[in-house]
């Protein structure tokens, strides 16, 4: 079966023309180096290239501006690169890099490459695709936060609904793909039901208020209202027309405010572009007429026509800025006019209401008209509520069916098999690591860590990640069979515990997967591993790796 394997990592500082290249192999990889030799930053660079949010030292973020990662998937080789927020992918059937501005677009392409046919829901009940940050949450133990809890939670996976549970179910291949499809439908429908219930409650509350005004329990239509006192009817109609005009004017004000807000956003973008063009023009004027690329040595002209093009583009933006400001001014004038009209209409409305009261304050006809208006509103609200209740009942019935199907697809008989397998593997690893509590209770396929502390907690977490890694190799078709472990010797381990931690590497190195461990000291497994040694204190990058990869860097630059 095909699975992802890391082949080469290259981190580059284009400004100083220095780089660091790391070559990986299948099986066990050991990155060994003293403190401040860049071990953790290099290993985090793998995940950063694939979009996972990791915490680098500030100096590393300032130093590295281009990340390059070669991977294989069976016989196919792929290249992933990242420059700040931009992602790049090169596939075997394409000579050029595909560029992705958003992480979601990059994730969608990534999932297509590795046949991840899965959609889940976010915390807003929306259907979304899983990102590498979610898919890799059980395959990385972070030196900073990974040794205190399970799983590793990258910051950019927090918006997924039930992220921890969903990811372990998917990566272990425990449930059929149909489960995730139906689960997605169910989660989305649950949010819709909640919104519908809220809407129904609002309509019901409004209807109750109308009932109180009518002082009746059940509304029965009574169209027989005496037609007399034409002057009162005329005034009532005028009041209704005036109120409608006020409502229309308020809507027009909201529309103009939306235009202003949108125009201000456009104006901000235009100003930013103008500022950048001004900088470009000043910079171009300061350069010689001929420029040579330091990487590919291609000659470029920097003469008057090129600079004139920048000036022309700036002038066009200035015109657009002026037009946008004119739109804002016009909308503000419209709003002022509408507000003045509203003031006039409100005064007119008060006069009309006063006129009705003067005609006959005691006339039952006025009360009849008021009651009739409330009656019509109540009847309409009651009809709407009955319709909405029918919609809600249909949604609830669909939800029950989906819930039943999801339960059938994820029955205890199915999921208990995963729990038992992980518990057995955990017990085996925990015993090998001399953990006294080798069989804790499991919840949502993870061991309870509440009875562990100190070095025991570190070894418990290590045991579980090894168990998931081992399970995937023997039981899953999941394409990501790797585990990255960052510096266990920083976690308060004594000599004996460290030896037990390293002893498991010998067994894991025999499995068909890729295990990468970062450590400050030798492990005793070096003869069975691909070893990368780092020795330069705070000098991770070098000129040699940059020159050796100059052609590759040139291709990336192009």
Image (tube, grey):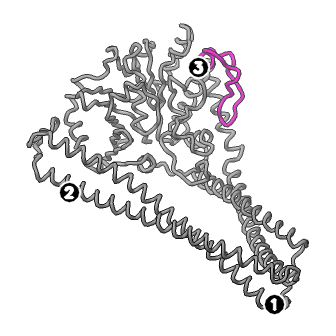
- Would residue 394 appear left or right of 68 to someone viewing this image? right
Q: Quadrant of residue 314?
A: bottom left
Location of mark 1 (residue): 229
Quadrant holding the N terminus:
top left
N-terminal of the pair, mark 2 or mark 1, is: 1
Circle 2 is placed at which residue position? 312
Q: Name the spot of residue 60 as percent of width and height, x first.
A: 37, 26
CA gap, disc 1 and disc 3: 88 Å
- 269 vs 425, nearest the viewer: 269
Nearer the observer, disc 1 or disc 3? 1
Q: Regarding mark 1 in the picture, which secondary structure is present there?
A: loop
- Residue 451 can be seen, yes or no: yes
The picture places residue 500, in percent across and down from the top left corner, at 55, 14
What kind of element bears circle 2?
helix
Q: Main secondary structure of the magenta part?
A: loop
Q: Where residue 389 is drawn, which disc sits there? A: none
Magenta-colored span: 432-457
230 to 112, vertically: above or below = below
């Amino acid at each position: 079966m095909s699975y992802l394997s890391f082949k080469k990592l290259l981190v580059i500082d284009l400004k100083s023309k220095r780089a660091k290249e790391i070559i990986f192999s299948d099986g066990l990889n050991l990155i060994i180096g003293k403190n401040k030799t860049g071990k953790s930053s290099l290993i985090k660079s793998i995940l950063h290239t694939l979009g996972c949010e990791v915490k680098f030292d500030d100096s590393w973020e300032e130093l590295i501006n281009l990340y390059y990662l070669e991977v294989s998937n069976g016989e196919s080789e792929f290249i992933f690169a990242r420059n700040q927020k931009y992602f790049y992918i090169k596939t075997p059937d394409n000579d050029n890099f595909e560029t992705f501005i958003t992480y979601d677009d990059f994730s969608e392409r990534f999932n297509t490459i590795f046949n991840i046919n899965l959609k889940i829901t976010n915390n807003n009940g929306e259907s979304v695709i899983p990102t590498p940050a979610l898919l890799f949450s059980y395959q990385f133990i972070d030196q900073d936060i990974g040794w205190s809890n399970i799983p590793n939670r990258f910051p950019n996976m927090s918006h997924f609904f039930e992220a921890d549970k969903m990811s372990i179910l998917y990566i272990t291949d425990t449930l059929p793909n149909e489960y995730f499809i139906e689960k997605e439908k169910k989660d989305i429908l649950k949010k819709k039901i909640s919104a519908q219930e809220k809407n129904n409650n609002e309509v019901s509350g409004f209807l109750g208020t109308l009932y109180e005004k009518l002082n009746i329990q059940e509304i029965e239509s009574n169209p027989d209202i005496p037609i007399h006192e034409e002057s009162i009817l005329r005034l009532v109609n005028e009041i209704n027309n005036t109120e409608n005009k006020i409502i229309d004017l308020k809507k027009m004000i909201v529309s103009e405010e939306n235009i202003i807000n949108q125009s201000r956003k456009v104006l901000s973008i235009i100003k930013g572009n103008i500022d950048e063009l001004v900088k470009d023009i000043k910079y171009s004027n300061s350069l010689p007429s001929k420029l040579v690329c330091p990487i590919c040595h291609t000659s470029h002209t920097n003469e008057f026509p090129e600079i004139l093009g920048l000036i022309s583009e700036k002038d066009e933006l200035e015109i657009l800025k002026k037009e946008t400001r004119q739109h804002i001014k016009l909308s503000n004038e419209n709003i002022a006019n509408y507000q003045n009209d509203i003031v006039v209409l409100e005064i007119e409305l008060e006069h009309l209401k006063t006129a009705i009261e003067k005609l006959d304050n005691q006339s039952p006809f006025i009360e009849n008209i008021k009651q009739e208006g409330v009656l019509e509103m109540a009847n309409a609200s009651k009809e709407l509520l009955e319709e909405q209740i029918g919609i809600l009942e249909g949604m609830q019935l669909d939800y029950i069916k989906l819930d039943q199907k999801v339960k059938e697809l994820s029955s205890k008989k199915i999921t208990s098999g995963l729990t038992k397998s992980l518990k057995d593997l955990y017990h085996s690893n925990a015993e090998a690591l001399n953990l006294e509590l080798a069989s804790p209770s499991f919840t949502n396929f993870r061991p309870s860590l509440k009875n562990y502390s100190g070095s025991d907690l570190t070894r418990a977490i290590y045991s579980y990640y090894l168990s998931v890694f081992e399970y995937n190799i023997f039981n899953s078709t999941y394409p990501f069979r790797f585990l990255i472990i960052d510096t266990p010797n920083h976690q308060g381990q004594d000599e004996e515990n460290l030896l037990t931690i390293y002893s498991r590497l010998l067994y894991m190195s025999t499995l068909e997967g890729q295990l990468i461990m970062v450590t400050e000291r030798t492990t005793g497994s070096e003869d069975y591993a691909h070893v990368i040694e780092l020795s330069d204190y705070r000098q991770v990058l070098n000129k040699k790796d940059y020159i050796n990869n100059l052609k590759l860097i040139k291709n990336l630059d192009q």
